[in-house]
C-alpha cells in the first residue's frame, strides 16, 4: 500500500479519507475518476513536432565546462545548478531548447520567466542584426532615434499619468532606483513589502526581499519592513472565491459571492503592521501583482486596492513590480496591476521587456520625476540603441503574434487541466495563477498543507526534465513548481506537459 492518501494506477486513483476538522473543498467526482487526460500515467506521448533544426554542437566537452564552472565562474553558479544531472544548453528557438547532445526540451520556464515572445524570435533577431550594423552603442547624452521611438511606444501601453520612462539594465536596478525615487519624492524613508517577495539582488533591494534564501548575514534592509502575505492557500485565512484566477483554492468558506472574509482579515493585519512596525509616514509599498519567486502567489481580489489606499493615506507611493507579470503574461491584461483595478505611482519592469536581452525600466509620473531631478542621474548603458531596438521589436511581436491572447487561452487551459491533477493527487495542494504565470504547490497532504519535502520535490522535478520538459521552482520552502514559459506555447505543448507531469507524479507515488 502506498503511504500517501492515494493509490495511483494507470486507470485513476483511490482515496482513503483521513479524519480532520479542517474544511476542504474538492471538485465533485474528482477522486476515483477516470483519468481526464488523453494519455494514461504509465505512458509518455511523443514530443510535439518542431520545424527547426539546430546546429550541430562542436564546442568544448561537458566535463571541461563543469571544470571551468567550478574553478573560474562565480561559485554561486555551482550552488544554483538546477539539476543533479546538469543541463548543457546549446541552442533555442521559440518554445524549444536543445542541449549539446542534440536533445530537445519544451521550455516552460523561459530562462526564469524572461523569454517572452520566444527564443531567437525571428522578428527580434532581425531587429538586433539591423541595429548592430548601424550603431552598437552611444549614450543618452546624445539624441538617437531608437531611444525616443521606444520610449514613445512603451508609454502608449501605459495609463495616464504614467508616462515618464527611465531605462535600466535589470529588474534589480529598476527596483533599486524606485526605492530612491520614492524616498526623495515623499521625504519619508520606510518601505513596506509582502513576505515571500523578491525584488532583486542588489544590496538595496536585498532589504525588500522577504525570503531568507536571498539574504546575507550582513546589515541590510534599513527602512524595509515586511508584512504578512495574503496567501489564501497557505495563509491563516482563505476560501473558495478569493482569487482572480480560473482555479480557486480547496479551502471551504462561508463567504457569499462578492464578499471575502479572508481579504478583511489580511487588510486588518496590514493595518496592524502600520500601527506597530513603521512610522506614521512611509515612503512606499512594493508589491508584485502576482508573486513570482514566491510561487505565483495571488492575493484576495480587492487586497491591493485597499492596501494602496492605506499606503497613500500615510504619504507613501505604490510601486508595482511588473518584472514577471508584465507584457501580457497574465493574459487578461497587458500589466498585472490592471487585474487589480489599481494604478500605481511607479512601475518597474524587466525580464520579458527584452525577451532575454539585458534591459529594465521604471515608469512614473512627471511629478515624481521632477522630485528625482534634485541630483544628476546617469546610466551609461540604460537605453542603449541595441536594447531599445530589441525592446521595440518585442512589443511589435506581442501585437503581431497575438501573444497576450495566447497567454490567456493556453494558460487558462493549462490551469483548468492542472486543477484536475490537483483533485487526483493528494500531493498537489494548490494550482493557481493567471495566463502563463502558474504555480503548482506540492504538499504532504491536503489536510495539513505542509510542504512536500525537498527530496520529493527534486525527484519529481528531475523526472520531468528527463522526460523533456523544463519548469521552475519557487516558494519559501521550494515546494512550488513554477510554469512561466515563452508565451508562444501551444495547446499541443500544454497537453504534452500535462502528460509528462501526470507521469512524473505517478512515478513518485509508485516509489513512495
Image (cartoon, rainbow, N blue to C red):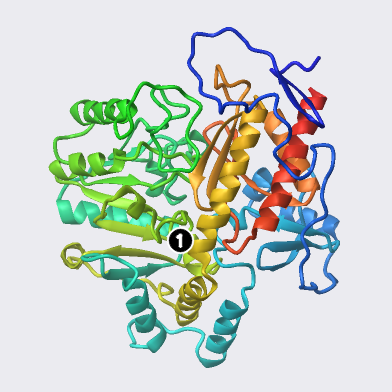
The C terminus, quarter of image: top right
Q: Residues within 10 Å of mark 1 (few under 14, many from 20)?
A: many
**Front-most of residues 354 and 67:** 354
Identify the residue at horizontal 44%, vertical 36% (top origin).
Answer: 196
> Total marks drawn?
1
Q: Position of residue 270 (x, y in %)?
A: 26, 31
Relative to 428, is 60 above or below?
below
Res 156 quadrant in image: bottom left
**Front-most of residues 395 and 50:** 50
Relative to 384, is 294 above or below?
above
Q: Position of residue 465 (x, y in %)?
A: 75, 47
Q: Position of residue 391 (x, y in %)?
A: 47, 74
Q: Is 502 positioned to the left or the right of 27 in the image?
A: right
Relative to 377, is 469 above or below?
above
Q: Is 430 positioned to the left or the right of 38 in the image?
A: left
Identify the residue at horizontal 30%, vertical 51% (top origin).
Answer: 319
Q: Position of residue 21 (x, y in %)?
A: 49, 8
Q: Is residue 293 visible?
A: no
- Element at badge 1? loop
The N terminus, quarter of image: top right
Identify the residue at horizontal 55%, vertical 52% (top origin).
Answer: 411
Q: Is 379 positioned to the left or the right of 214 in the image?
A: left
Q: Which residue is mark 1?
A: 328
Identify the residue at horizontal 46%, vertical 54% (top origin).
Answer: 330
Q: Is residue 50 visible?
A: yes
Q: Is 394 positioned to the left or the right of 427 in the image?
A: left
**Front-most of residues 193 and 123:** 123
Amino acid at each position: 500500500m502506498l503511504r500517501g492518501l492515494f493509490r495511483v494506477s494507470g486507470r485513476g486513483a483511490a482515496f482513503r479519507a483521513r479524519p480532520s476538522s479542517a474544511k476542504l473543498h474538492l471538485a465533485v467526482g474528482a477522486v476515483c475518476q477516470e483519468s481526464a487526460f488523453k494519455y494514461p500515467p504509465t505512458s509518455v506521448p511523443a514530443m510535439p513536432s518542431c520545424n527547426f533544426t539546430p546546429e550541430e554542437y562542436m564546442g568544448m566537452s561537458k566535463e571541461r565546462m563543469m571544470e571551468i564552472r567550478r574553478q573560474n565562474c562565480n561559485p554561486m553558479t555551482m550552488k544554483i545548478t538546477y539539476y543533479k544531472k546538469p543541463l548543457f544548453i546549446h541552442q533555442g528557438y521559440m518554445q524549444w531548447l536543445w542541449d549539446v547532445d542534440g536533445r530537445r526540451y519544451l521550455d516552460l520556464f523561459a530562462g526564469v520567466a524572461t523569454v517572452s515572445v520566444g527564443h531567437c524570435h525571428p522578428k527580434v533577431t532581425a531587429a538586433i542584426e539591423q541595429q548592430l550594423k548601424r550603431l552598437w552603442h552611444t549614450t543618452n547624452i546624445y539624441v538617437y532615434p531608437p531611444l525616443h521611438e521606444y520610449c514613445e511606444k512603451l508609454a502608449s501601453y501605459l495609463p495616464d499619468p504614467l508616462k515618464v520612462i527611465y531605462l535600466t539594465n535589470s529588474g534589480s536596478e529598476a527596483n533599486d532606483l524606485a526605492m530612491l525615487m520614492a524616498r526623495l519624492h515623499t521625504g519619508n524613508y520606510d518601505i513596506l513589502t509582502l513576505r515571500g517577495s523578491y525584488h532583486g539582488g542588489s544590496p538595496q533591494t536585498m532589504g525588500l526581499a522577504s525570503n531568507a534564501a536571498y539574504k546575507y548575514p550582513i546589515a541590510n534592509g534599513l527602512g524595509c519592513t515586511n508584512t504578512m502575505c495574503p496567501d489564501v492557500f497557505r495563509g491563516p485565512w482563505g476560501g473558495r472565491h478569493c482569487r482572480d484566477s480560473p482555479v480557486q483554492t480547496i479551502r471551504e468558506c462561508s463567504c457569499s459571492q462578492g464578499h471575502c472574509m479572508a481579504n478583511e482579515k489580511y487588510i486588518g493585519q496590514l493595518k496592524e503592521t502600520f500601527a506597530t512596525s513603521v512610522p506614521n509616514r512611509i515612503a512606499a509599498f512594493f508589491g508584485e501583482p502576482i508573486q513570482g519567486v514566491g510561487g505565483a502567489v495571488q492575493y484576495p481580489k480587492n487586497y491591493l486596492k485597499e492596501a494602496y489606499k492605506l499606503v497613500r493615506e500615510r504619504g507613501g507611493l505604490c510601486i508595482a513590480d511588473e518584472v514577471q507579470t508584465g507584457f501580457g503574461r497574465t493574459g487578461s491584461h497587458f500589466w498585472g496591476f490592471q487585474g487589480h483595478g489599481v494604478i500605481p505611482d511607479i512601475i518597474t519592469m524587466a525580464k520579458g521587456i527584452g525577451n532575454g536581452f539585458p534591459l529594465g525600466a521604471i515608469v512614473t509620473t512627471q511629478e515624481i520625476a521632477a522630485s528625482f531631478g534634485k541630483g544628476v542621474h546617469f546610466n551609461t548603458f540604460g537605453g542603449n540603441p541595441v536594447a531599445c531596438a530589441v525592446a521595440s521589436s518585442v512589443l511589435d511581436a506581442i501585437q503581431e503574434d497575438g501573444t497576450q491572447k495566447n497567454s490567456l487561452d493556453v494558460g487558462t487551459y493549462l490551469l483548468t487541466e492542472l486543477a484536475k491533477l490537483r483533485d487526483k493527487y493528494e500531493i498537489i495542494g494548490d494550482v493557481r495563477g493567471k495566463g502563463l504565470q502558474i504555480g503548482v504547490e506540492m504538499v504532504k497532504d491536503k489536510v495539513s498543507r505542509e510542504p512536500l519535502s525537498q527530496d520529493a520535490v527534486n525527484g519529481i522535478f528531475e523526472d520531468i526534465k528527463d522526460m523533456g520538459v523544463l519548469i521552475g521552482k519557487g516558494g519559501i520552502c521550494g515546494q512550488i513548481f513554477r510554469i512561466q514559459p515563452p508565451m508562444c506555447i501551444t495547446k499541443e505543448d500544454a497537453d504534452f506537459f500535462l502528460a509528462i507531469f501526470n507521469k512524473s507524479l505517478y512515478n513518485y507515488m509508485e516509489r513512495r
